[in-house]
Every structure is written in structure tokens, then in C-alpha cells.
């Protein structure tokens, strides 16, 4: 494309055009910043489904603002004819495709994530080896805060190949599982009833949700898994700790013996 044809694509740049572009950019940035402050602030004052619904709106509204700003800026900068639009967008697509392949793939995956919603703000998800609460769904990456209070940024590109496990999927209900390991010589029905009562009396328990105690035999004894739901997903670790400490204390008080498993020594990597 020669210089004359390239010049025909663009509007004549003057102070008015520059001012329009600056106003569009400032307005879009201001709206996005206000959105990312206001909606999480509002969500922090809500509970249950309302909180998750408000948080899930953040990436969708931000995407709408970005697309709107782009659509407003293009006619200001480019002579709005069909031929010009095809030429510009075709060239732009090729350039981005070659230069920013992975970044563009993450952006596309981000748009897919907004539509399919495999994770939303407020969800507890496992992506690869990382588990945490989704705090921000950006255009390129999703931010998780882990139980150790680390912020992890994961590109949406992982969406194409990595399995994503969502523990609560946009709802406040999140199932916790706490395991107990007992010596095989005991009354299983009594142990199951005792652990059920421990879960039922937890101050963190969501009373409207089911409680299950599952048992299975292992070579070293019997494993019991208590499955129940805390009132709020953010209380899952306090809930699990409460069940573990009170459950263990009650089992010992009632004369149950915990399983004794001899730990295998770790292999010496240095000596093979």
C-alpha cells in the first residue's frame, strides 16, 4: 500500500480529532476505574448470590466499555468507508496475529471466559496447581488470591488446555471435606454418628445444606470424610479447622484410637 492510499484511510489529524480521541480514552479509563472500585465495594456489602452476581458483572461491563470506546475511536481516526475498514482491520489482524500470538490468544480466551463463565469474581477455583479465590477477571489474565494470601495471575490462555475446577460456581455454597483416620478396631456406626454431630454443631455450618459422612477401608485403618458446607465460601478454612479440632478431640474422648501409619522415608535425591 503506497503513501497516497495510506493517507486516504485516515481522517485529517487536527486539534479537533486529537481532542475527540483524548476524550474517548479518558472517558473509557475513568469508567473502567470507577467500575472496578464501585462494584467490588457494593459486593462487599452484599451476601450470597447477590454478591457473586455483582462481582461477575465487572469483566463483562469492562469488556463492553473497551469495545464501545474502540468503536467510537475508529470513525474519528479513519475515514469511515467499507473499503477502508476492511483494509485497516485486515492489516491489524495480521500484525497482531504474528506479533502477539500468545497475548492475542489470551485476549480471545478472556472473551470466551466472559461468555462461558468458567470462573467469576468470588469463585474458588483450581487451575493447574493453584487454588484460590478469583478477585479479578481481566482482559488477559485472571487473578487468584491463594489461602497463603499470595496473588497469582494466570493467563486466560490456560483455558484452552488446563482443567478448571470451580468449587462454588457463582454461588455462596462451597463443600468442604475433612478427613479422619481411625484404627480399624472400632464401632463404625458410632464413629459416623459422632462425626455427623460434630459437623451439625459447628458455628460455621450452613444449616440448609446436606451433611455427609463417607467411610472407606484402607490397609492401615478406616478413613472417614465429613462433607459439609460453611455459611460463606470465605469461611471454608475456619470451618475445616473447627471440624478437625473438635472432631479429633471428641473421637479421643470417646475412646477411639487414631490410625498409626509409619511414614516412608523420603528418597535421597543427592545419592540417587
Image (tube, rainbow, N blue to C red):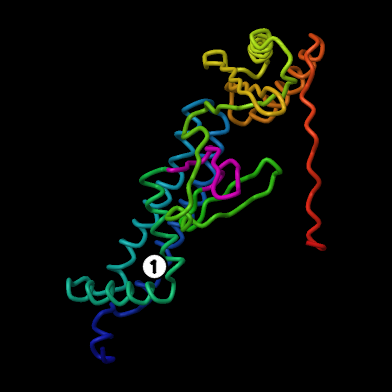
Bin the neighbour count of mark 1 within 10 Å (Cα to Cα): few under 14, some 14-19, many 20 and up: some
Looking at the rendering, in which quadrant would you find the C terminus? bottom right
Q: Nearer the viewer, residue 216 or 237?
A: 216
Whether residue 230 appears in magenta in the rendering, the answer is no
Q: Nearer the viewer, residue 156 or 16?
A: 156
Whether residue 134 appears in magenta in the rendering, the answer is yes
Residue at which label 1 appears: 21
Q: Nearer the viewer, residue 222 or 53?
A: 222
- Segment tinted magenta in the rendering: 118-136
> On the rendered structure, is 206 left or right of 179?
left
Looking at the rendering, in which quadrant would you find the N terminus? bottom left
Instruction: Give the residue drawn at x 63%, y 45%.
Output: 145
Q: Quadrant of residue 264?
A: top right
The percent coordinates of residue 197 (x first, y second) are 66, 9
Q: Nearer the viewer, residue 16 or 188?
A: 188
Residue farthest toward the front in the current orientation of the protein = 219
Q: Quadrant of residue 199?
A: top right
Instruction: Give the residue drawn at x 54%, y 26%.
Output: 47
> On the rendered structure, is 204 left or right of 175?
right
Residue farthest toward the left in the current orientation of the protein = 82
Does residue 197 lie above or below 248 as drawn?
Answer: above
Instruction: Give the residue drawn at x 38%, y 59%.
Output: 108
Amino acid at each position: 500500500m503506497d503513501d497516497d492510499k495510506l493517507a486516504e484511510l485516515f481522517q485529517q489529524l487536527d486539534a479537533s480529532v486529537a481532542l475527540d480521541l483524548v476524550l474517548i480514552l479518558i472517558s473509557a479509563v475513568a469508567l473502567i476505574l470507577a467500575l472496578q472500585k464501585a462494584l467490588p465495594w457494593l459486593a462487599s456489602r452484599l451476601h450470597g448470590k447477590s454478591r457473586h452476581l455483582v462481582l461477575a458483572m465487572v469483566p463483562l461491563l469492562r469488556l463492553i466499555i473497551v469495545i464501545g470506546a474502540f468503536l467510537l475511536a475508529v470513525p474519528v481516526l479513519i475515514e469511515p468507508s467499507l473499503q477502508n475498514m476492511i483494509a485497516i482491520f485486515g492489516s491489524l489482524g495480521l500484525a497482531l496475529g504474528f506479533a502477539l500470538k500468545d497475548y492475542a490468544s489470551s485476549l480471545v480466551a478472556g472473551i470466551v471466559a466472559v461468555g462461558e463463565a468458567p470462573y467469576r469474581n468470588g469463585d474458588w477455583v483450581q487451575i493447574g496447581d493453584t487454588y484460590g479465590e478469583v478477585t479479578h477477571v481481566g482482559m488477559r489474565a485472571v487473578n487468584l488470591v491463594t489461602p497463603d494470601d499470595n496473588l497469582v495471575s494466570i493467563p486466560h490462555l490456560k483455558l484452552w488446555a488446563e482443567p478448571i475446577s470451580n468449587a462454588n460456581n457463582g454461588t455462596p455454597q462451597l463443600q468442604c471435606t475433612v478427613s479422619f483416620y481411625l484404627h480399624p478396631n472400632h464401632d463404625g456406626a458410632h464413629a459416623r454418628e459422632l462425626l455427623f454431630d460434630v459437623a451439625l454443631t459447628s458455628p460455621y455450618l450452613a444449616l440448609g445444606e446436606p451433611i455427609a459422612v463417607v467411610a472407606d477401608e484402607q490397609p492401615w485403618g478406616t478413613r472417614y470424610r465429613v462433607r459439609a458446607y460453611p455459611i460463606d465460601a470465605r469461611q471454608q478454612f475456619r470451618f475445616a479447622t473447627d471440624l478437625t479440632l473438635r472432631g479429633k478431640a471428641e473421637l479421643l474422648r470417646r475412646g477411639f484410637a487414631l490410625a498409626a501409619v509409619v511414614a516412608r522415608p523420603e528418597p535421597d535425591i543427592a545419592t540417587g
